[in-house]
Image (cartoon, grey):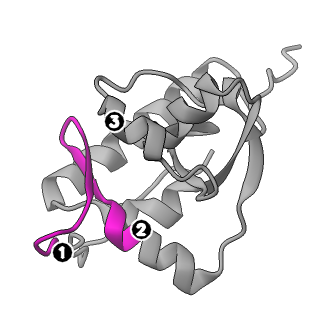
Amino acid sequence: MKLLKAKPDYVPCPVVEGDELFPNGIFEFNITQIIAYIKSSNLAYEEIALSDVPRGYSSLNESHVDTADTTVPVILAEIAPNRYNLIDGHHRVEKVRREGAAKITAYKLSVEQHIGFLTSHKAYVEYIDYWNGKCRLLRKEGVSLKGKQKNKQ
């Protein structure tokens, strides 16, 4: 588990009118810019089990669930080592769940891929502290990079 170091020259991701944002406490991500990054980088998506997509969105616009385009992959961000949260596609996930499907397509962004899309310097610094705290805790618990218990002798 790699600890992150704050870049002294970090510039928060700019927000322009009309950008879609994903707020999660003080961690706000610019989804519009993440989508542009995905398209320009030709990132591959993968099929994942819906059971691997955490529930927990607070509210959904019911009329939007029915019209959600489930052919567009959702976006998961690694918010702790080997732990991903849904940051874009809540309506698509809900529609697929209601249809009884077991899988959905998703882009899985590593911390290095998505940290640059935080919209404030404070969030960036706090995110690094949060990430590093999770790494230290997992190391203390004896969890390796692959998320498995280390053999204790």
Q: Which residues are magenta?
A: 15-34
- How crowded pointer 1 is (Cα within 10 Å; few <14, some 14-19, many 20+) is rated as few
> Quadrant location of residue 13?
bottom left
Q: Is residue 101 magenta?
A: no
Residue at point 35% right, 49% down? 128
Judge left or right: residue 64 versus residue 28. right
Report the residue marked by disc 2. Answer: 34
Frontmost residue, 144 versus 62: 62
Q: Amino acid at mark 1?
A: Pro
Query: Does residue 42 lie above or below 15 as drawn?
Result: below
Q: Secondary structure at mark 2?
A: helix
Image quadrant containing the C terminus: top right
The mark lying in front, picked from 2 and 3, is 3
Q: Which residue is mark 1?
A: 14
At x 71% / y 23%, what residue is drawn? 100
Q: Position of residue 76 (x, y in %)?
A: 54, 47
Tag 3 or tag 1, which sits nearer the N-term?
1
Marking on residue 63? 3
Q: In the rendered view, would you say 32 is above or below 25?
A: below
Q: Position of residue 41 (x, y in %)?
A: 59, 82
Tell me if 46 is positioned left or right of 93 in this view: right
Quadrant of the frame with the N terminus: top right
- The residues bearing labels 1 and 3 have C-alpha atoms spaced at a distance of 30 Å
* Mark positioned earlier in the residue sequence (2 or 3): 2
